[in-house]
Image: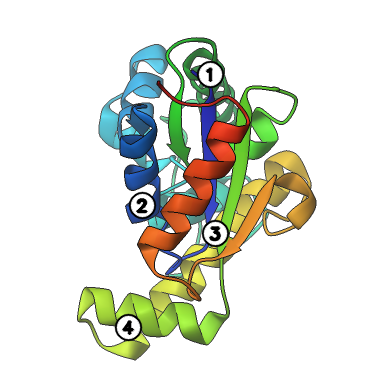
Amino acid sequence: MGIVTVSAAYGAAGAEISRAVADRLGLPFHDRAIPAQVAGRLGVSVAEAEANDETVVRGLWRLVASLGTMPDPVGGVLPTATLPDARAYRQQTERVLAEIADGAGGVVLGRAGALVLKDRPDALHLRLDGPLERRLELAAARSGRPREEVRREMEANDRAREAYVRHFYRCDPAEAAHYHLVVDSTAFAVDTVVELVVTAARDRGIGGA
């Protein structure tokens, strides 16, 4: 069946496009279920796993701060002594991704999937991005929240995701060389981007009949 990994900058409609691609390809969409599986393997609560999950902005800053590479945005490092080492979350997440790819496949949003599964021939690695101001404009319009509030969240989110990838994989998540397909999803309608990704995935033999 194959797997599509999606790396998306804030405001690039990553969740919307990923779900639509999964539906079109007849594949499961994997997002919130991943931290639940990681939690079960590490013997912690789902809340604790989500707090260390790559897709949770606050959790990402907590993760990076606990590793001593960056200060917590509110000043200080949050206690993590009662939690498994952050690398354990990464390792278990990598195992879950490999099992998804080895099994029924799917569309996975985030979690550095393109780097974890970079050598698989049955994968399509996608990056969704766009100019900062355009991403901000679209995110504010979708959420209906004040522009400056969305800007702060976007900047924290983008920095945190980059910090996660740089710390564990020593590279820039926005670098085009990591992906088969890089799309400015702010320049096209969502349906157009979905069609492009689905076409690319099927060309690599991914998806149901």
Whether residue 56 is situated above or below residue 5 in the rendered picture = below
- Tell how many labels: 4
Name the residue tied to disc 3.
Answer: 128
Whether tag 2 and tag 4 are in contact, CB under 8 A, the answer is no
Whether residue 166 is situated above or below residue 73 in the rendered picture = above
Whether residue 183 is visible here, answered yes or no, is yes
Label 3 or label 4, whichever lies nearer to me, is 3
Whether tag 3 and tag 4 are in contact, CB under 8 A, the answer is no
Q: Quadrant of the C terminus?
A: top left
Name the residue tied to disc 4.
Answer: 149
Q: Of the numbered discs in the image, which one, if any, rests on residue 101?
A: 1
Q: Nearer the viewer, residue 86 or 38?
A: 38
Sequence-first tag of 3 and 1: 1
Whether residue 112 is visible here, answered yes or no, is no
Q: Nearer the viewer, residue 167 or 176?
A: 176
Give the farthest residue toward the left.
Answer: 144
- Find residue 161 and report its horizontal and vertical position in percent: 56, 55
Label 2 or label 4, whichever lies nearer to me, is 2
Q: Quadrant of residue 74?
A: bottom left
**Residue type at mark 2?**
Ala
For mark 2, give the secondary structure: helix
Label 1 or label 4, whichever lies nearer to me, is 1
Q: Nearer the viewer, residue 51 or 113?
A: 113
Marks 3 and 1, Cα distance to the nearest angstrom?
21 Å
Marks 2 and 3, Cα distance to the nearest angstrom?
10 Å
Q: Residue at x 46, y 77 (%)?
A: 135
For label 4, the crowd category at 10 Å Cα-Cα, with few meaning under 14, some 14 to 19 and many 20 or more, is few
